[in-house]
Amino acid sequence: MSTHFSDKFLPFALPDIGEEEIEEVVRSLRSGWVTSGPRAKEFESDFSAWLGGGVESVAVNSATAGLHLALEAIGIGPGAQVITTTHTFTATAEIVRYLGADPVFVDISPDTLCLDPVLVEKAITARTRAIIPVHFGGRAADMDAISALARKHDLRVVEDAAHALPTTCSGRLIGALDSEVTVFSFYANKTITTGEGGMLVTRNPQIAKRTRVMRLHGINRDAFDRFVSKTPGWYYEVVAPGFKYNLTDIAASLGIHQLKKARRFQQRRAEIAARYDAELAGLPLVLPPKPAAGDTHSWHLYVIQLAEDAKVRRNEFIERMFEMGIGVSVHYIPLHHHPYWKETYGLTPSMFPVSERVYEGSVSLPIYTRMTEADIDRVIAAVKAILG
Ligand SMILES: *Cc1c(COP(=O)(O)O)cnc(C)c1O
């Protein structure tokens, strides 16, 4: 009895880790530096250079940690409001609650599946301090409009760029725009991975300094330089009750090599997206929004929306895909469906008609660099078999 190839389960996502990463991790283990040290520093400087320079990069152990540090550094606290979307992962909004402030949720635009700038402006009050756009799936939010609103109303912009490496907006890389802070994720299923990890990027030296101090217990080492720079580094001062958010050298060893491959990874994902676009075009579904002309989409996610007149509803579609041995997912169950967010802020689906309509039909198809042509064919054939 031979097992036919298509009997094997095709996972929804897989990391793409090469020998370079493995050897670097082993070198890190042998070196004696396992937590934050030379490799974390190297990853930070590589990252700033990769973005074209002129920014500071602060390595952290998750994007959630980076977003928390960003809001702390820009002074978000009780009484403040931060405008964001419910069409995201809960991390985007929970960090606002960590600081005792309140997220204010607005709907997305159907053209981008990201924050609708018109609704953002309507939601601004005297208490609004910041806006957190999410580049959903790796398609840039309308950052020109959001930045203009921030300038007009004196608000800070913190980009949740967990999906956006590499993504461009009006020809510029996300991370190199003029937002106060941008935060990337290197979680296992993101476009590049360190297992767990993230990078906070800013052009503001005060924010870089504050987040470096707060990612490691509020310890300020400048005092050491001022007072005892001739003796080994035993002296430090605690200037705030900080956090434990530093990235280890073991994780940074992965990041250094993943970053070098980021553009190649994106090209492969874009090829897969182009095949899906071409082959699924005639079916009763809405394809993911295209990037603006000339812009790069990271293609972290490929989210289709089943049309109202499709033969099957979303949950049945997912069951059928799994029966055919193909892993799919849903991004996301909007925050206005989760008990905590619903109850705390009195959210109802009718407040977010676009997010709601998109969610009803949403299915994320597998899209990752390790997929073979046969894997891609198999996904296309399965979608056609269910919907055609
Ligand atoms: C993955 C993700 C995060 C959190 O990233 P971690 O590195 O796991 O903390 C935040 N926002 C969005 C939109 C994400 O997809």
Image (cartoon, helix red, strand yellow):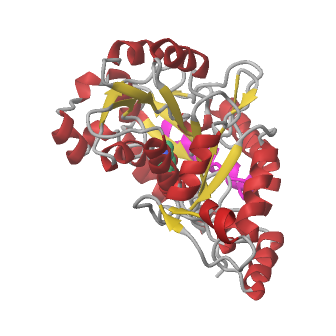
Residue depicted at x 24% and y 42%: 341
**Side of 173 relative to 186 (left or right):** right
Is residue 86 at all visible to an observer of this figure? yes
Residue at 57 percent of width and 30 percent of height: 288
Q: Is residue 121 positioned above or below 360 on the image? A: above
In the figure, is residue 72 to the left or right of 158? Answer: left
Q: In x, y percent, where is residue 382?
A: 57, 47
Residue at position x 41%, y 35% from top? 87
Residue 139 image position (x, y, % from top left): 61, 31
Describe residue 267's horizontal placement relative to residue 196 as left or right.
right
Q: Main secondary structure of the magenta part?
A: helix
Q: Is residue 388 visible?
A: no
Q: Nearer the viewer, residue 378 or 216?
A: 216
Q: Position of residue 116 (x, y in %)?
A: 45, 19
Along the viewing direction, whichever of 112 and 238 lies nearer the viewer:
238
Give the image location of residue 267, x and y in percent: 79, 42
Q: In this picture, which residue range is highlighted in magenta?
A: 367-388
Q: Work out which quarter of the rendered image holds the N terminus and state it.
A: bottom right
Tell me if residue 146 comes above or below residue 197 in the rendering: above
- Is residue 370 in the magenta section? yes
